[in-house]
Image (cartoon, grey):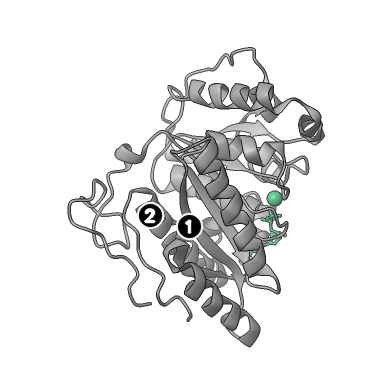
């Protein structure tokens, strides 16, 4: 894939090399990042990619991670709860300051994140006063700082209070999309939301990238949608695609990251995912690999 990563010399992040990139990133300079996976459309891969990103930070980068599942359906929670020390995401909207155990670095074999579980009670938040619960959420996330290096937030598929709270509290937003009919319209809506929040409430919010998921290179329709996306929003598109791969839901159903499945199809999926995550990290670090050509 041409033009994968152009790192400007002098960038704070362009120092030392992450596997697969020409230079390593100083991950500790990126530490204490809060990343939200967001798109008002359902079924585009928010939960899947948020869970895999959290695993990737823990397994491959040795980071301590808090995972916040803001979806009442709690799909991410189901996938992560086997290994995670569990709290309720609802606690993060309370004025009562969180009491937290310190999360010491764990050996790789016991890698676990601090999970704030999703659940049906979260739906009630949509009826609460935003001016009370949104600042409370932001303050609670700030309290996680001594315990974790990264916070990953999965959001519900709606432009509601929980998505606003996540965007207002976050440093980075990743927007997974599926290249189907109307997906460009959905991207436009999502960008309006992200930049609206950035302008009004959170100037520190950065769009890490739009990430095409469940891509089918044999579909002419998807390829043309990808071309259109890149021609409209080139500067925001991560120059990578994640194909539809059965190994991805299979691994998550087994509550494992896809790179731990010993199968060829899982290895192929892992290569794409790891490449996409490395590019996302590069963009979060201030280097902006262009997406002039992402069509396989
Ligand atoms: N690249 C992929 N290949 C195959 N299946 C995928 C892929 N990404 C997501 N899925 C599946 O698609 C469905 C929707 O994904 P999910 O992450 O739950 O979307 P969202 O959180 O945006 O609603 C899930 O069953 C998930 O396992
Ligand atoms: Mg989801």
Q: Disc 1 on helix, strand or loop?
A: strand
Whether label 1 lies within 8 Å of ligand 1 gets the answer no
Quadrant for ligand 1 reads bottom right
For image coordinates 49% across by 67% down, the residue present is 233
Of callouts 1 and 2, the N-terminal one: 1
Expressed as whole percent of the image width and height from the top left, the position of residue 101 reads: 52, 17
Is residue 209 shown left or right of residue 257? Answer: left
Q: Disc 2 on helix, strand or loop?
A: helix
- Classify 232 as above or below 86: below
Q: Is residue 82 visible?
A: no
Q: Quadrant of residue 114?
A: top right
Residue situated in front as seen by the camera: 67 or 197: 197
Expressed as whole percent of the image width and height from the top left, the position of residue 191 reads: 57, 55
Label total for image: 2
For image coordinates 57% across by 82% down, the residue present is 223
- For mark 2, what is the residue? 283
- For mark 1, what is the residue? 209
Q: Quarter holding the N terminus? A: bottom left
């Amino acid at each position: 894939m041409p033009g994968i990563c152009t790192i400007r010399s002098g960038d704070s992040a362009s120092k030392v090399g992450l596997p697969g990139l020409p230079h390593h990133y100083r991950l500790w300079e990126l530490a204490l990042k809060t990343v939200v996976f967001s798109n008002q459309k359902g079924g585009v891969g928010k939960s899947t990619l948020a869970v895999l990103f959290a695993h990737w930070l823990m397994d491959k980068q040795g980071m301590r991670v808090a995972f916040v599942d803001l979806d009442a359906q709690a799909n991410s929670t189901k996938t992560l709860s086997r290994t995670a020390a569990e709290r309720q995401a609802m606690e993060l909207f309370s004025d009562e300051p969180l009491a937290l155990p310190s999360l010491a670095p764990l050996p790789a074999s016991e890698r676990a994140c601090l999970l704030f579980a999703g659940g049906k009670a979260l739906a009630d938040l949509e009826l609460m006063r935003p001016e009370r619960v949104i600042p409370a959420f932001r303050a609670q996330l700030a309290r996680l700082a001594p315990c974790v290096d990264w916070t990953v937030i999965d959001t519900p598929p709606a432009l509601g209070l929980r998505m606003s709270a996540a965007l207002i509290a976050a440093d980075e937003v990743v927007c997974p999309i599926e290249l189907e009919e109307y997906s460009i319209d959905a991207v436009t809506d999502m960008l309006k939301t992200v930049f609206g929040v950035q302008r009004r409430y959170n100037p520190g919010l950065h769009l890490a990238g739009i990430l095409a998921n469940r891509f089918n290179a044999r579909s002419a329709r998807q390829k043309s949608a990808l071309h259109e996306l890149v021609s409209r929003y080139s500067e925001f598109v991560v120059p990578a695609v994640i194909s539809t791969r059965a190994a991805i839901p299979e691994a998550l159903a087994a509550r494992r990251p896809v790179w731990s499945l010993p199968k060829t199809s899982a290895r192929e999926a892992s290569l794409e995912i790891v490449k996409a995550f490395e590019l996302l990290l590069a963009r979060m670090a201030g280097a902006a690999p262009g997406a002039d050509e992402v069509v396989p």
